Each structure stands twice: as C-alpha cells, then as structure tokens.
Image: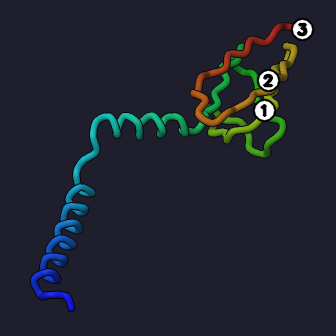
Amino acid sequence: MIKTSKLFTAWIVLWLLLVCGQLFAKLPSSPQHSALSQHSATSTAPFHLTVLAEPANARVRIMNIRDKYRPAMVLAPGRYRVQVDAPGYRSQQFWLTVKAGRPSQPLHVALQRQ
C-alpha cells in the first residue's frame, strides 16, 4: 500500500509541473521566435498583381479566370494568361506564374504602336 507521504509528494510534484507548464506557456516569445514567425507570415503572404501599362488607357485582362482585373488584386498560386491591349497598339499576351511566397511587384508593360 502507498504511504500517505508518498502520495502527497506525488501530488505536489504533479501540481508543480502543471503550474510551471502554464507559466512557460504565458511567457512572451523570444525575438528569434518572433522573427521566424514574421518570416513565415511574409513567405505565405498573398500575391498582389498590379500591371503598369503604357499607354495609361490600356486594358488589362486575365484570360483564364472570371474575375476582372483590378490593380493589386490577389492571385492564388498558379498560372495566369495576362493580356494587355489598347486601341492603336499591338496587344501583348504572356503567362504569369505565381508561386507561394513570391513577392508582389508591379509588372511594367509597354505596348508598341501599330
């Protein structure tokens, strides 16, 4: 049979483990840990598509999705067929591949006069 003193000691040890575990869970994260979490947050940040076209009145379309183009629109990882056209200019079409973690940068497209 277990003696009362041993049972009491076991309860104290268990209680201390639980209290210490709760204290460590409430401690703020270290700067190194927060830097890692910020890095992972930026690596999974969405890709924002902005096309800066010349002439300024050029129309931008993404041919293989239903959504209409709008500056800084969010695109999920994948391949997109982008078309830029304007009256009196040769249209341009190109494939844009968006990979997870790709940084958002504006795309410059200068159309040539016909």
Q: Mark 2 belongs to which amino acid?
A: Val
**Furthest-bottom residue in this view:** 1
Q: Position of residue 13 (x, y in %)?
A: 17, 70
Mark closer to the observer (3, 2): 2
Residue 114 circle label: 3
Q: Which residue is mark 1?
A: 61
Q: Please tell me whether mark 2 sits on a helix, a strand or a loop.
A: strand
Q: Please tell me whether mark 3 sits on a helix, a strand or a loop.
A: loop
Quadrant of the drawing holding the N terminus? bottom left
Disc 1 + disc 3, Cβ < 8 Å:
no
Disc 1 + disc 2, Cβ < 8 Å:
yes
Q: Is residue 30 visible?
A: yes
Q: Is residue 111 above or below residue 23?
A: above
Give the distance between the C-alpha atoms of the residues marked 3 and 2, in whole angstroms. Answer: 14 Å
Residue 84 circle label: 2
Q: Is residue 55 visible?
A: no
Q: Please tell me whether mark 1 sits on a helix, a strand or a loop.
A: strand
